[in-house]
Amino acid sequence: MRSGIKVFAPASVSNVACGFDLLGFALEQPGDEIIARISDKPGISISKITGAKNKLPFDPRKNTAGVAAQKLLDFLGETGIGIEIELHKKMPIGSGLGSSAASAVAAVVAVNELLKHPLEKRALLPFAAAAEEISSGAIHLDNVAPSLIGGMVLVHKGHHADAFRLPTPKGLHAAVVCPEVEILTKDARQMLHPFIPLEKHIEQSGYLASLIVGLYQSDLALIAKSLQDVIIESQRAPLIPFFYEVKEAAIKHGALGCSISGSGPSIFALCANSHIAGQCSEAMARIYRDAKMEHLLYLSPINQEGAVKC
């Protein structure tokens, strides 16, 4: 078997309370791994998938990793080349942590590495983003961008999609708890109200603006005041068992803020340091332990590198 290139792409927390579809940050763990190698068969093929519990298709036209990789090949005019990929899922599907985005990101970075870096890392964003439409029904950047370039990222989905790295205070950590409930992004989006009152829009915009100021100024108090979601959270909370109890526990134990990661069911608490994050994670997990509900727990600083060659 030919040698290959292995790439890890991290999970990500999107929306970050006040930044619906606009804000996300990368985690150190979990994430996905892609191994890519040259193949004799033109185009993209998927030879192996692990960790997905038979939930993902091998057809590259229906798998975000395959779609992203093929779009990159098409853009580069490398339609005659063959690339075989293995997808190793190291994170749960339907968790609200950007599972499909991580697969797509790992794939384009691996293919780009295999082809000797024809594009800079940031230039791979549109190919990974386009693949997201397969899983969620629309192109979203708030998981893809942080998974690719790392950090806390503000995205823009206008005529020219772009991503902007925001500064983060030193020591900032996230505690994430994921109860064993699968929520698909398509389903979670369909339940959202298509219209919002003007005053709610203004309030949410103010929270996002002040959060960005707080990040630039390393003002933890302002960050804590800004991590509020007055539009989406209340609509999706009923999908997540014990959401409000978990949120209350996190805030009580010192979290700057706590909300739903992406479409859920993962719940994140953003904390000033690793010690507080550890206390919050224990308090959050205790809710599910007491309810005898299976769950996963992740503790992580904000990942500043994004996808990397292993």
Image (cartoon, rainbow, N blue to C red):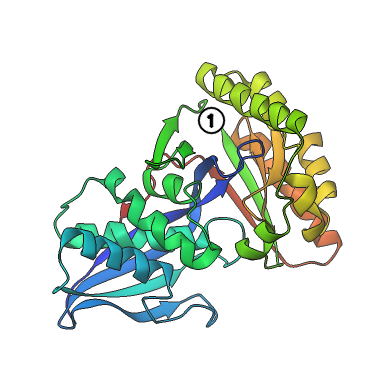
Q: Position of residue 39 (x, y in %)?
A: 18, 79
Q: Position of residue 224 (x, y in %)?
A: 69, 26
Q: How many residues crowd around disc 1 within 10 Å: few (fewer than 14), some, or many (20 or more)? A: few
Residue at 49% from the left image edge and 51% from the top image edge = 140
Give residue 275's quadrant in the image.
top right
Element on which disc 1 rests: loop
Residue at 71% from the left image edge and 24% from the top image edge = 225
Q: Left or right of 308: which side holds 261?
A: right
Q: Position of residue 41 (x, y in %)?
A: 18, 83
Q: Quarter of the image containing the C terminus?
A: bottom left
Q: Left or right of 50: which side holds 182?
A: right
Q: Nearer the viewer, residue 192 or 82?
A: 192
Q: Nearer the viewer, residue 295 or 84?
A: 84
Q: Left or right of 214: which side holds 178?
A: right
Q: Position of residue 200 (x, y in %)?
A: 75, 32
Q: Quarter of the image containing the N terminus?
A: bottom left
Q: Quick check: 64 above or below 243? A: below
Q: Nearer the viewer, residue 19 or 265?
A: 19
Q: Left or right of 239: which side holds 149?
A: left
Residue at 68% from the left image edge and 35% from the top image edge = 276
Give residue 206's quadrant in the image.
top right
The residue pinned by badge 1 equals 171
Q: Amino acid at mark 1?
A: Gly
Residue at 78% from the left image edge and 44% from the top image edge = 247
